[in-house]
Image: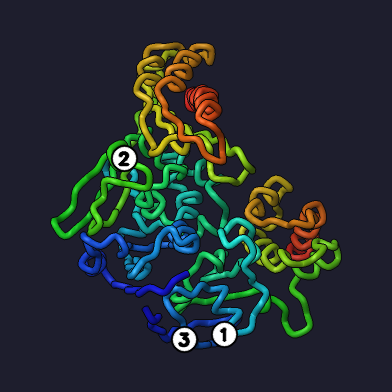
Amino acid sequence: MSPQLRHISFTLNGNSVTAEVAPHHTLVEMLQEQFHLYGARESCGQGLCGCCTVIVNGRSVSGCLYLAAFADQANIVTVEGLAKGEQLDPVQEAFVSCSGFQCGFCTSGFILMVNQLLEKNANPTEDEIRHYLSGNLCRCATYPDIISAVHAAATTLRKE
Amino acid sequence: MIPFDLQEPASLAEAIALLDPDDPSVRPVAGGTALMLMMKAGLFQPTRLISLRRLEGDLRRVHVDEHGDLHLGALVPLSKLELSPLVAEHAPAVSETCRTLSNVRVRNVATLGGHVAHGDPHMDLPPLLIALGARARAVGPRGERWIDAADLFVGYYQTALERDELLAEIVIPAPSPDSSAAYVKFTALSADDWPAVGVAAAVRRREGVILDAVLAVSAATEKPIRLAAAEAAIRGKSTSSGSFDEAAEAAAHEVEPLADIRGSTAYKREMVRVHVRRALIKASHS
């Protein structure tokens, strides 16, 4: 069966965009193939690891388990949409200053999830951070540094 | 994934009309998280999916009616159940169960209706809905009908829903003042794995005595089921935890656990014993 392409339009990192997607395409496939955005990447493919995290209408989703067609009319933010030019956002800065990564493969997912957490909870405890990020896996096991980065970012954001 | 057709109706009636009672390759999809896993694994190859994402109204609503019954729309995402003050007040065990159900991203997308209608015995809420005496309202071309949660799950990935029916809502009856409920699970492979065993308990107690209890087990068994022998064993017993051993023993005796990568039949039987006891302790002391 040949896939019937559909025309969708949505906001991507603040810009109005359009795309042609087949019903069986995932959000992460569309972002990579049509917009050359590789921050969200498929790793486990099962929604467990968080490497494909994308923000859809203000909520985090696993881009590997989300149909691209469902992006129609949505507001999509990827890790590429966080920095303002050369200016990293406070969570990104904190991950750099605390070395909250090693290989970096999981980092974009963690950064988006931490942004979500800090929007809801400006001063999370370590337990709250661990619980919220329990669906993000770092195979380099930089978890202690990631938790330091969350505390550092929270401190910066509370001052802003 | 292999290609398929996608239709996006704007109303429940339109969605039902698009379903095909005779074609198992046509399925409704809401959040899609569970279905996508099956499609990616090649276990389900749809020809056509009917997306429910454009449907609005009561399907997305959480409210309490004049009798104190809690109505949960089928398209309510699990994160909304987790965070809803109404759910926390009227069914705190549901809020708590949602906190450790998969992860934030899945809860943001997966819906209550999909969670239930998927019929996967590893889902967390079905045993709790059974214990709480919940009912499901199904809507199809012949009108609507109510199905008790205890009758909804008929086999491995099989529910009592017809292929052309959709869940509209789940209703949890108002709790009596002397009742409380809890759900406990055991994840064998990692903390956030699918459960190897899930046990829900709802008890009514007065002056340290259990008047009656509803117990349901999931994940270890081919479908979520009530534990009738264990329920009988606990009736009239003291809420001191020592008296739960008999019920736990009865539960271990009456289940037929399926062996898989999360444990052998014997191991899961033992885990059912342990977790029935824990669920009773938790429900009796919350």
Numbered mark located on residue B149 in the image: 2
Look at the image and tell me whether residue B66 can be seen.
yes
Query: Could you tell me how far apart the alpha carbons at marks 1 and 2 are, in whole angstroms?
Result: 44 Å
Q: Where is residue B156 in the image (x, y as percent from the top left)?
A: 37, 43
Mark 3 nearby-residue class (10 Å; few <14, some 14–19, many ≥20):
some
- Residue at position x 56%, y 76% in the image: A29
Q: Mark 1: which amino acid?
A: Gln
Mark 1 nearby-residue class (10 Å; few <14, some 14–19, many ≥20):
few
Query: Could you tell me how far apart the alpha carbons at marks 3 and 2 are, in whole angstroms?
Result: 41 Å
**Are callouts 1 and 2 both on one chain?**
no
Quadrant in which residue B11 is drawn:
bottom left
Foreground residue, B119 or B99?
B119
Q: Tag 1's secondary structure?
A: helix
Judged by depth in the image, the label closer to the viewer, 1 or 2, is: 1
Numbered mark located on residue B162 in the image: none
Q: Mark 2: which amino acid?
A: Ala
Judged by depth in the image, the label closer to the viewer, 3 or 2, is: 3
Q: Where is residue A116 in the image (x, y as percent from the top left)?
A: 63, 63
From what the image shows, is residue A84 above or below residue B213?
A: below
> Label 3 belongs to which residue?
A20
- Residue at position x 52%, y 30% in the image: B268
